[in-house]
Image: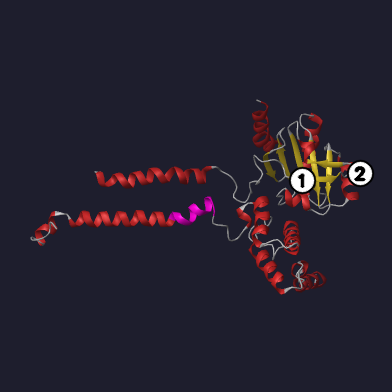
Amino acid sequence: MMRRLLVMVIFCFIAPGTWAIDTDKAFDDPVLQARYDKLIAEVRCVTCQNNNIKDSNAFVATDLRREIRRMIGEGKTDAEVVDFLVTRYGDFVLYRPRTSGKMLLLWIAPFIFLVFGVVAIVRVIRHRAALPINEALDSKGASK
Amino acid sequence: MTRYVWPLIAVIVILPIFWLGLSDGRNVNELQSQYIGKPAPEFDLPTLKDPLKRLSNKDLTGQVSLVNIWATWCSGCRAEHGFLMELFREGNIPIYAINWRDNRPAALGWLDQLGDPYVASGFDEDARVGIDWGVYGAPETFLINPEGQVVYRHAGPLNPTVWAGEFLPRIEGMSQ
């Protein structure tokens, strides 16, 4: 009993997950490292969908970190790296999806609805303003 | 009466959009392959059994075929292996494979022990092809048409229900 408890406590402290992920610096150049850090924080781990690949040690996350490291090392731009990922895994792989195609509709739809709403309100107000009761209260100039 | 016309039209327009968006009954955690209707991603791998032979997407044309992503560390692969053997014995569809992130002796041992349903397994040791195919967890099974295009991708173990529900109708659709 004690031994089992001890083992459990030890496992709590060594928390294998914390040292399983390759947190070593990927690049000596701080600019490249910053781009790498930013990219892996914004790419979803598709295996474990509420993690980014920075925090995940799933095989696919490990592989994607490796691919991103390779592409940055080869001098690819961030846009090219993102293209590579989206071609294979879709927009879903990005935590900040690109504003294009279907995404664009999502972004502008609220504003379209806003326009509808404003039009509706204006119409209602005009309609109310034209009601007879207003004419009675404001006998002159109501028709203007 | 006319004051209800515009809201009514708005509802009539919006409802079908919501309906289409919500009713296709798919599991939101299940990702659609990005290659549906497109040529299978290019690959060229040494085969598992003979490193001198190659398996590439050129092998996937000319007939309807399956590409199964598997590995010995993958419990779902063990679960579906019996069913793959069944498909193999029926002999109606060739099954190609990509052995993903595995080691060769373990993979060969697995096939010795459980049977080999595959025409050939490509050996993707460094997991580049897995990424190119958009794999997000083994097992996955891709249905490929005679033109070498991806028709469907199933993530998770194959079983008779999935086979009858998702694969057979698509295969029949192709042969017409």
Q: Secondary structure at mark 1?
A: strand
Q: Chain of mark 2?
A: B
The span picked out in magenta is A100-109
**Image quadrant assignment for residue A29:** bottom right
Name the quadrant of the N terminus of chain A. Answer: bottom right
Q: Residue at x 13, y 54 (%)?
A: A132
Q: Note whether residue A122 is visible.
A: yes
- The number of discs equals 2
Work out whether A103 lies above or below B144. below
- The residue wearing badge 2 is B52
x then y, percent, for residue A32: 71, 69
CA gap between label 1 and label 2 equals 21 Å
Which of the labelled discs sits on residue B95, or is there none? none
Q: Residue at x 51, y 46 (%)?
A: B22
Q: Are discs 1 and 2 less than 8 Å apart at CB?
A: no
Which of the labelled discs sits on residue B69, or is there none? 1
